[in-house]
Image: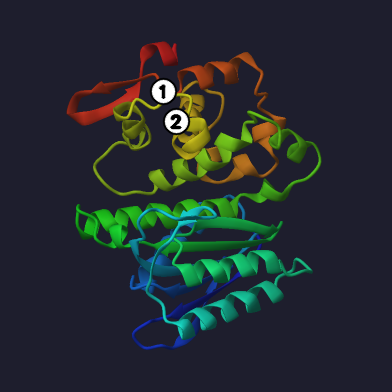
Amino acid sequence: MKKLLLILFLVTNLLGKSYAEQYDDQNIIIVNKSSFPTKILKEWSNIASSKMASRESNIFVFIYDVGERIEPTQEFGPGALHQVLMSPNEINESYQMIEDWFKNTSCGYVDYELLDLTKEGLEKGVDWSSQWAICTEERFVIMGLTDNMRNNPGGRDAFYADLQEFLQHELYHAFQHDLETEGECRNKADRRDSNSRWMIEGGARFFAKNLLDDNKSFDSHILQEIYERRMGREAFEGESDKAGSAALLLMSKRGLINESEILDGSLFHDCARELKFDKNSDEIKFILKNWNNIIQVGNGEFKFSPEALK
């Protein structure tokens, strides 16, 4: 793994000041405008990065709080509008930090359309949960922490688990090497019903669920919600992370892929999702037919049925 530098900008709302710390083997900038402790965000980021077989990307992460959702729901890009909690000055300062990072990337250009979208989203309190591949080695992550997240009915532990999964899911996207790969990879990925639409999101959920530390089995982390909600084929459109993580789990159970390839990110080094796995093959057709063939076993645990594994 090539040696990289991690610069962590810690921005606190209470003190209104920022400072930098240096770490090795990573290159992640976190600007934290939320009320959540930056120290824990840093720890989760370091853990996620340490799992990767190799790292190529420089990552800028911006995290901030939003209030209650505005009703009726008003969609904005990939999110919805919420009560704005940052002051106009904080929004302008935040935008300036984001713009400065864009101007200093290795991409050779500034995506002002994305910058304008970001600023408008901050001004409107959008609950971002997005990662953008600015170019091959530069990734931008923005996350809006909602009032519902902070006041999770399950208490602090449930909130921490949700936020950990949220952050490590988005970081995994930023670790995926091949999101900007052109040529045959891009051509196949852009086609209807490509593997990319569920493998990319499914891989991020698979990875983030694996890092959760509780008493539930990993299989149940992936499969429980799918079983309880009787999720079907439509999930590949609206909830491709859930359907995709189950499909990847089944692929690993059937020996089509090593679980380690997902967890260390190497599945996404050379576009295996399109160039190795043929969506029209009998193996992948079987996976897409049986990814939700799940049974419940003792103690509230879930696993694939014998028919899915035979």
Q: CA distance from mark 2 to mark 1?
A: 7 Å
Q: Looking at this view, is 227 or 277 the one in front?
A: 227
The residue under the point 39% across, 52% down is 165
Q: Which amino acid does the dot numbered 2 rest on? A: Ala
Quarter in which the C terminus is drawn: top left
Q: Is residue 118 something one can see in this rendering?
A: yes
| Badge 1: residue crowd in 10 Å (few <14, some 14–19, many ≥20) | many
On screen, residue 206 versus residue 272, left or right, reads left
Q: Looking at this view, is 108 or 310 the one in front?
A: 108
On screen, residue 254 above or below 73:
above
Q: Which amino acid does the dot numbered 1 rest on? A: Asn
Q: Position of residue 39 (x, y in %)?
A: 37, 72
On screen, residue 46 versus residue 60, left or right, reads left
On screen, residue 91 above or below 64:
below
Secondary element at image label 2? helix
Q: Position of residue 157 (x, y in %)?
A: 23, 57
Name which quarter of the figure residue 125 lies in: bottom left
The outermost residue toward the front is 72
Q: How many marks?
A: 2
Q: Position of residue 41 (x, y in %)?
A: 40, 66
The residue under the point 69% across, 39% down is 271
The residue under the point 55% across, 35% down is 198
Q: Is residue 28 something one can see in this rendering?
A: no
Residue located beneath label 1 in the image: 292
The residue under the point 54% across, 16% down is 286
Residue located beneath label 2 in the image: 246
